[in-house]
Amino acid sequence: MRPRLVFVHGIGGLCNPTAELDVWLRALADGARDAGHSNRVLDLIQGWAADTRFAYYGDLFRDAQAQGGAAQVDDDEAVFVREMLRAAVTERLEETIQESIQEPIRGEEIPVLRHAQAQLGPRGAPQGPGSVARQVLGAANTLLSVPGLRSFGGWVSARLMVGHLRQVARYLGRGEPDEEGLTLDTRIRRRLERELDTGAPTVVVAHSLGTVVALETLSAYQGDVPLLVTLGSPVGMRAAVGLRMRPQPLRVPGSVGRWLNFWDRDDLIAVRPLLENAVRPNARAVLPRSRRVDSDGISVHPAVKYLAQARVAGPVVEQLQAVTPS
């Protein structure tokens, strides 16, 4: 039986999951080639290397896709997005101040980051409905003016950026029940559960919000996950994300034999501290191993930018080979 490879996407708009699977596989193949696995490229693209699945749940956020995904953000969701951005900006500012000692050009970001930090700070009592959302949008506009961050997520506007980050708030809000009483987060996890296979080793590659979904889903999974790969994960945002996840305390799922976590310095969503400091080991003493990758600085958050990295693709291909029956 072939191993299974399951991709879990993150925030974003609606897409064709079949087409998206092909895009992700081709990006992984590019990374595999750079990692010295040219002989596996065709196997990946044709689906011979693994039974490959794409766990898609973007349609469950459909009502948030009005005007290209920039639907109105209510105040509760805006408060959550503000927490996410505040954590990301604070860490980015601290890193930039340190890096500017060796790389003075980095210092150009500091005034802009401080301005965004001030915009996201407490401002007393809210000034009417929508005030927090306006505050967040103002800070997002500021962040998108930083050259290194202008297109880190491929967003063309602050409103689209906030609209997509809102999806994390909706998932962790544990609300929006359907006619059967199933909340949004439950319905999303069920989409991933359908793609897992307890009968074969399963490599899981999750991106952005998908890393939250994957960790929560795998916590109850009884199959074998020899490798979990997380890309651009927000789980390190302890107050905004980590403490809202289930179950608590956060722990490496028992099914996971190895966990590699990748982050790009220009990916504002993938904040540090390192995930190995944010979760507890499982019974096999497995902890995440965080590794930095560096893209070209243009739209670094999308999954395909990570997958095309040799440091990401190499271990995935090697793990699939290791669990493939001879």
Image (cartoon, helix red, strand yellow):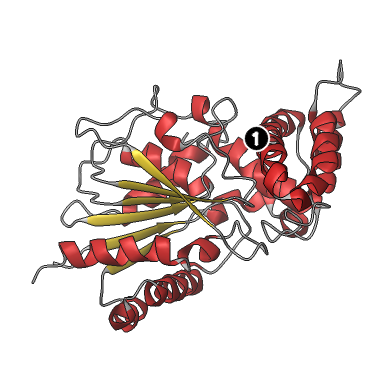
Is 261 left or right of 108, judged from the image as shown? Answer: left
Is 62 left or right of 274, judged from the image as shown? Answer: right
> Furthest residue to the top?
125
Residue 126, image quadrant:
top right
Residue 59, image quadrant:
bottom right
Residue at (76, 49) in percent of width and height: 104
297 and 232: which is toward the camera: 297
> Furthest residue to the front?
102
Vertical relation: 207 (above or below) 325 = above
Q: Position of residue 20 (x, y in %)?
A: 50, 69
Vertical relation: 269 (above or below) 136 = below
Residue 84 in view, yes or no: yes
Picture mark count: 1
66 and 230: which is toward the camera: 230
Residue at (26, 43) in percent of width and height: 256
Q: Residues within 10 Å of mark 1 (few under 14, many from 20)?
A: some
Q: Position of residue 97 (x, y in %)?
A: 72, 38
* Placement of the N terminus among the 4 image quadrants: bottom left
> Furthest residue to the right?
127
Residue 115, image quadrant:
top right
129 and 304: which is toward the camera: 304
The residue carrying mark 1 is 91
* Amino acid residing under circle 1: Glu
Residue 179 in view, yes or no: no
> Furthest residue to the left?
326
